[in-house]
């Protein structure tokens, strides 16, 4: 069985987790979304749904770290804009029906795949702190702002979905921009 169908299943699981959460993501929905053959699911994920979800979480985490590490913002405000642009794009492209797959798994009752989310959030924190440092903030300020930035973005994603509006997200972004601007001056 091809790794292409495996990659399609991971990508589909990621989209479904972001939109439907852990409970709403099943092998059936992943197969339907990915177009992968039914027999491929246990071939590629012999440990079942937990393995698929864990690998989807790890993939989302890895891709976002690569993106963050590739950025070279001129100012802390630019850093905030570049980080939040990704999440605004998720909201826009889904018509405010999707959020963060990592958060969806983190808050689910199933502890199996949830363990992977902690490592992802730690990696994101480190990458965002490094990004803020590259943009001109000192390390202690960057280390303090990074977890607050992640928590603010995740909360804004939830609020925007609940209100079916980009307004909460945009408001949080504006406040993050204001915060880093005051810390850099």
Image (spheres, grey):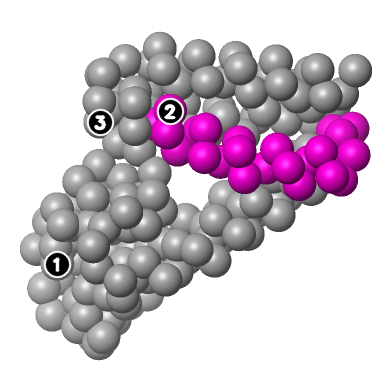
Residue 97's label in the rendered image is 3
Of pointers 2 and 3, the one earlier in the residue sequence:
3
* Displayed quadrant of residue 52: bottom left
**Disc 3 versus disc 1: distance between alpha carbons?**
21 Å
SS type, badge 2? helix
**Disc 1 versus disc 2: distance between alpha carbons?**
29 Å
**Dot 3 surroundings within 10 Å: few (below 14), some, or many (20 or more)?**
some
Q: Position of residue 167 (x, y in %)?
A: 40, 12
Do tag 2 and tag 3 residues touch (Cβ < 8 Å)? no
- Magenta stretch bounds: 133-157
State which quarter of the image contains the N terminus: bottom left
Residue 93 can be seen, yes or no: no
The answer to whether residue 67 is magenta is no
The residue shown at (60%, 36%) is 149
Q: Nearer the viewer, residue 157 or 58?
A: 157
Depth check, mark 3 against mark 1: the one in front is: 3
Depth check, mark 1 against mark 2: the one in front is: 2
Q: Position of residue 130 (x, y in %)?
A: 79, 48
Of pointers 3 and 1, the one earlier in the residue sequence:
1
Q: Nearer the viewer, residue 29 or 164?
A: 164
* Displayed quadrant of residue 142: top right
Residue 33 can be seen, yes or no: yes
Disc 1 target residue: 27
Depth check, mark 2 against mark 3: the one in front is: 2
């Amino acid at each position: 069985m091809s790794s292409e169908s495996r990659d399609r299943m991971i990508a589909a699981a990621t989209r479904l987790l972001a939109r439907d959460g852990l409970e709403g993501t099943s092998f059936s929905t992943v197969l339907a979304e990915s177009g992968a053959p039914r027999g491929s699911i246990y071939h590629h994920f012999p440990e079942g749904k937990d393995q698929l979800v864990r690998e989807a979480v790890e993939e989302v985490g890895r891709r976002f770290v690569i993106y963050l590490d590739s950025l070279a913002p001129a100012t802390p405000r630019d850093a905030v804009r570049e980080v939040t642009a990704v999440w605004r794009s998720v909201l826009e492209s889904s018509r405010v029906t999707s959020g963060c797959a990592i958060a969806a798994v983190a808050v689910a009752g199933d502890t199996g795949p949830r363990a992977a989310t902690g490592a992802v959030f730690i990696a994101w924190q480190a990458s965002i702190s490094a990004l803020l440092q590259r943009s001109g903030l000192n390390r202690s300020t960057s280390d303090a702002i990074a977890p607050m930035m992640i928590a603010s973005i995740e909360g804004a994603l939830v609020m925007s979905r609940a209100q079916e509006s980009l307004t909460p997200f945009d408001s949080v972004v504006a406040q993050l921009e204001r915060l880093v601007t005051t810390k850099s001056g």
